Amino acid sequence: MASSAVDSDSDDGMDALMDKFKTQRYKKGFNEDNWEEEFNKVPMFMKSAPEEIDPREYPELACLQAIVHDEDRPPEEQAQSMKDEGNAFFKEKNYEKAILSYTGGLKKKCGNEDLDTVLLTNRAAAHFHLGNMRSALNDAATAKKIKPDHLKALIRGAQCCIELRNFAEATRWCDEGLKAHPTDKKLRELRAAADKHKRAADRDARKAKAKEKKLHGEKETLLAAIKERGIKLFQSVKRPQRDSDSEDENETTSAAIAELSLDGLSSQEVTGAQVFLDEQGSLHWPVFFLYPEHQQSDFISAFCESTCFIEHLAIMFGEELPPWDMDRKYHPQNFQLFFEDMEKETLYQVDPEMTLMKVLQHKRFFVKAGTPSFIVLIKGSSFCKQFLTGKKILGL
């Protein structure tokens, strides 16, 4: 009888509830405008998990999350839940969150070696997809320590080594794996790929070494030619003072020759041209001509050391003068040519009939940045007089 009374009360309550909907619309139901949005809030129908779970907006999901992260459950059960959560994120390609979940599972220290190995290999896979090859390799190595024959750990370790271009190590991972899994197709493919890449890398290394040896030989020959001519190179780093000035100068030159490199002789400001030695044994230098009156410059990429200055100037200022020479006065016969000794604050006048080598061999000429530079003035001009005022002028 008691049961019948309860059933009767229940039926009466349901009837009243149903009667209520005959006159009032259910306010919390889905409507035609937002049913897809509301469906996406139900965990069973979600296409992807939200970045932040707000219990007020996603109460069901928040409840499930609380169950997953329930600290009162056994560590192994918690670790399993974290693994499942990480797998769900992984399927959505949300690798960052997958890593956090797998890491959370590992922190539970559940003591289940099989589960810990899976967590590590899964985290290695997430790191791999993010391009974190070193982290992925570390996880694969840790998993292999726990389970030396774990196939996924062995495959992932080999893949990481290949991506890190450590082909010898990749081969070692594959060989270890093939001992335990001799017929595994993936390991065989990785072993072949590692071997192929290693042969290519070794070939490239041999080519690079041969090229380096050739460049070194060319450099040594070039240095010997410069040293033989007594040409001095500018050193930005000051050497310790010696008792003798001549000893200082000789040591500075020797140090400059010793530290000279082909890259150091590049003219980076213009074309990257650099001094070179031709088949006849002549040096060709990149050379700057500076025209301070008009703040202009010219650049010759290969000025042969045996060529006179006037030969280049006659070509540069021949029939057609530069547009910036409004007064039409830049004719070779009007030129005064100088090089500057910045240390002595002195200008040395150069005879245009001189060869480049003759000037470079002067005891006070230092080649700076691999590019000799010269100042060109118009003799007798007001700018020339003003420019030379107060400066020490010496001839060669």
Image (tube, rainbow, N blue to C red):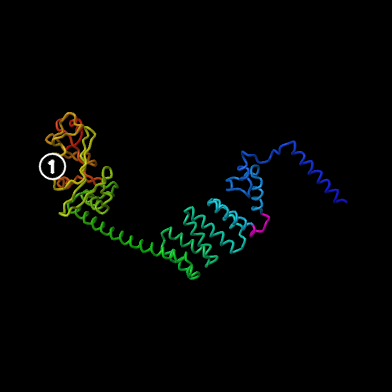
Q: Residue furthest front?
A: 22
**Considering depth in this image, is 278 or 362 the residue closer to the camera?**
278
Circle 1 — which element? helix
Is 37 included in the stretch rendered in magenta? no
Q: Quadrant of residue 346?
A: top left
**Pointer 1: what residue?**
311
Q: Residue furthest right?
A: 1
**Percent x, y for residue 145?**
53, 65
**Considering depth in this image, is 276 or 225 the residue closer to the camera?**
276
Can you see residue 358? Answer: yes
Label 1, residues with CA under 10 Å away: few <14, some 14-19, many ≥20 = few
| Residue that appears at 54% across and 66% down | 147
Q: Quadrant of residue 353?
A: top left
| Residue that appears at 79% across and 41% down | 16
**Percent x, y for residue 86?**
57, 54
**Percent x, y for residue 120?**
54, 59
Question: Callout 1, which amino acid?
Answer: Glu
**Percent x, y for residue 296?**
23, 35
First to last magenta residue range? 71-77
Q: Quadrant of residue 169?
A: bottom left
Q: Quadrant of the C terminus?
A: top left
Is 75 included in the stretch rendered in magenta? yes
Can you see residue 99? Answer: no
Give left or right: position of 217 versus 349.
right
